[in-house]
Image (tube, helix red, strand yellow):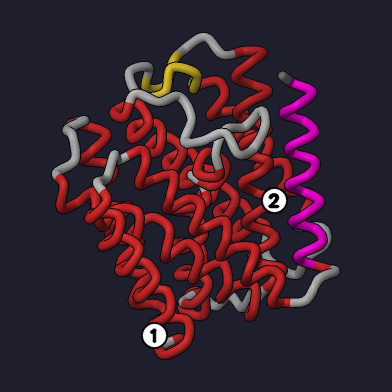
Amino acid sequence: MLKTRFISALSMLMILFLSFFVFDTWFFIVFTSIVSLTAIYELSLLLKLKFNQKIILWLVSLTTSIYFYFFNADNVNIILFTSLFFWILFPVFHLCKKFHLPNNLKIILPTILIVPLWISVVSLFLNNKLFLLFIFVSIFIADIGGYVFGKKYGKNKLIPDVSPGKTIEGVLGAFFLNSIFACLLSFYVSVDLLFILVGTILITFTSIFGDLYESLLKRQSGKKDSGSIIPGHGGILDRIDGFCPTIPISALILNYSYIFGVIL
């Protein structure tokens, strides 16, 4: 299992490297589109949507993506603010109350989770590729820290009725490793250590939060994984759940970083 997980992780990193530094821009856009569509499909299965609900979901998701990418790219902050307000308000309430989602909310939830992610990923790739790479690496480090420290030292469950495998020690390990990453990175970039440290802490927090929220959705649907497309890891959604809040919020912060006198 560990060998399979490692090979899959290495393959994903190779694809990421090639799409960032070797292949044409359109490869990245098409690749992330396929990933996003697969995640929406997996969410529709988790939420147990009926056929007519899936039709509405696909129409809303595709229309929103096309509109903001092709016809309203200058106002991308609208959808990023929508994502920010959603993640601040709804998942926190949902995790606390653990109620089952009403049907009308199930239809739009995949759009709210995935479409801002895709739009922000593509926008950052086109305008600030290195910042997007920084977010990706920080999320990967948080995952590694959480997994390694959780396996070795994990004793105290974080939210056992939502994600039994996630421990407080694993979360602390994620923050610890990303803090080291921030310190090392500060020697190579012309950005103050404080801003890098705050960035990695925020990315770690939001990625863990996204992971927890997807765990709630899986638990309520009675499934362990969102799918099985990635050997040793589960589904696409299982790999990008931490990206869903992190990248849109990070992109929004980047767009307004000039307020703090920081140009990234």
Where residue 221 appears, as percent x and y from the top left, is 31, 29
Q: Which stretch is magenta?
A: 2-20
Report the Cα–Cα distance between label 2 and label 1: 27 Å
Q: Main secondary structure of the magenta part?
A: helix
Q: Is residue 3 magenta?
A: yes
Assign the N terminus to one quadrant of the image: top right
Where residue 63 appears, as percent x and y from the top left, is 35, 75
Query: Does residue 4 sit above or below 46 in this rendering?
Result: above
Q: How many marks?
A: 2
Assign the C terminus to one quadrant of the image: bottom right
The residue under label 1 is 75
Q: Say the numbered circle drawn on residue 137.
A: 2
Q: Residue at x 85, y 69 (%)?
A: 22
Q: Name which of mark 2 and mark 1 comes first in the sequence.
A: 1
Query: Does residue 158 sit above or below 208 in this rendering?
Result: above
Q: Is residue 242 magenta?
A: no
Position of 4 with respect to 95 (left or right) is right
Q: Mark 1 belongs to which amino acid?
A: Asn
Element type at marker 2?
A: helix
Q: Residue at x 60, y 50 (%)?
A: 200
Where residue 235 appears, as percent x and y from the top left, is 55, 38
Does the CB distance between marks 2 and 1 fall below 8 Å? Answer: no
Q: Mark 2 belongs to which amino acid?
A: Val
